[in-house]
Image (spheres, rainbow, N blue to C red):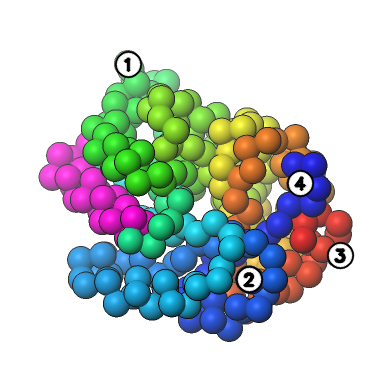
Amino acid sequence: MSSLPIAGAALTLDAYERHRTLMTEKPRDLELQDFVNAEVLNGDWSPLVARARKVLDGHTGRIGIHGPFWGMNIANPDPDIAAVVTRRLLQGLEVCEALGATHMVVHSPYSTWDDNNLDNYPRARERLIERCHAIMAEPVKRAEAIGCELVIENIEDKNPRDRVILADSFNSSAVAVSIDTGHAHYAHGSTGAPPVDYYVRAAGNRLRHIHLQDADGYADRHWSLGQGTIRWHAVFAALAELTSEPRLIIELRNLDEVPASIAWLQAQGLAQ
C-alpha cells in the first residue's frame, strides 16, 4: 500500500442507508450483514437483494457479504451435518452472484482445543483439512465460477499460520485468508497467541480481508477503534508491507460508531 488505505465497513442495509454519505465519499469496501441467518437463506431473499441493488446504486467500493456461520463448522466430521454446511455455503454464494459480491466470509474450523491436540493424534491435521475439502469442494468451484473469494476468518485460532496452510491447500484463487483483529487479540490475551500484527505477517499476501474491531484481549468486544488495547500502529505497519489490497472492514457491535472509528483512523494517520 503506497498511500493511506481506505477503510470500509460491515453494515446492514438499514445502517448503510444511515451512513450512505460516508460510505460513498470514497470507494469504501462494504460487507453486508443481512445474509448470515438460515431463515434468510432458506427463504425468498430476492426482495432483499433487489433492495440492496437499489440502495447500493452509486457505491464504488467492493461489495461482499458475511457468509452463514451460526452452528457451522467447515470441518464437521458428521456427514449429515457436513451436507448442511455445504448447502449453506452454496446458498450464500447464490446471494453473492445475485449481488455481484466479490467476497464471502467463512469461519475458521480451528479451535483452541485443536492447537493443543491436533498433534496428539495421527494425521489429525491432515484429516481436518481433508474434511474441509469435502465440505467446501463444491462451494470453491462455485466461487471460482462467479469471481468471488471465500475468505477464512480466524475465530479461536491460536496459530495464525493454520488458516494460511488451509487456504493454500485448495490451490484456488477463490480461497484466501481473513483476519479479525478482535478475535486475534482475544487469542493473544486469553490463550497465549501472538499479537495481532503477527497474524498479519503470517498471512502475508494471502490476506485479502480484515475485520477491524477493538477489544481488550479477554472477549470478542467489537468496540469502536481506539477504545480497546490493540496496538493499531503495529497492525497498520504490517498491513503497509502487503500488496494484496485486503478489504479493510470495520466491524462493530454498534454500527453507528463506524464514522467515529474512521475519524479515529484518520486522526492517527493510519487510514482514510
Magenta span main SS: helix
* Number of the front mark, 4 or 2: 2
**Numbered tag placed on residue 122 in the rendering:** 1
Amino acid type of disc 3? Ala
What's the distance in space between the residues labelled 1 and 3, CA to CA? 51 Å
- Based on the picture, tell me whether residue 85 belongs to the magenta stretch: yes
- Verify CB contact (< 8 Å) between mark 3 and mark 2: no
Q: Where is residue 7 in the image (x, y as percent from the top left)?
A: 68, 59
First along the sequence among labels 4 and 2: 2
Quadrant of the rendering where the N terminus is positioned: top right
Q: Position of residue 98 (x, y in %)?
A: 33, 61
**Numbered tag placed on residue 267 in the rendering:** 3
**Numbered tag placed on residue 236 in the rendering:** 4
> Residue at the location (62% across, 37% down)?
244
* Number of the front mark, 3 or 2: 2
**Numbered tag placed on residue 90 in the rendering:** none
Amino acid type of disc 2? Met
Quadrant of the rendering where the C terminus is positioned: bottom right
| Crowding near the residue tagged with mark 1, few <14, some 14–19, many ≥20 C-alpha atoms within 10 Å | few
Q: Position of residue 71 (x, y in %)?
A: 30, 55
Amino acid type of disc 4? Phe
Q: Regarding mark 2 in the picture, which secondary structure is present there?
A: helix
What's the distance in space between the residues labelled 1 and 2, CA to CA? 49 Å
What's the distance in space between the residues labelled 3 and 2, CA to CA? 18 Å
First along the sequence among labels 1 and 3: 1
First along the sequence among labels 3 and 2: 2
User: What stretch of residues is rendered in magenta?
Assistant: 77-97
* Number of the front mark, 1 or 3: 3
Q: Regarding mark 1 in the picture, which secondary structure is present there?
A: loop
Q: Regarding mark 3 in the picture, which secondary structure is present there?
A: helix
Q: Regarding mark 4 in the picture, which secondary structure is present there?
A: helix
- Based on the picture, tell me whether residue 205 belongs to the magenta stretch: no
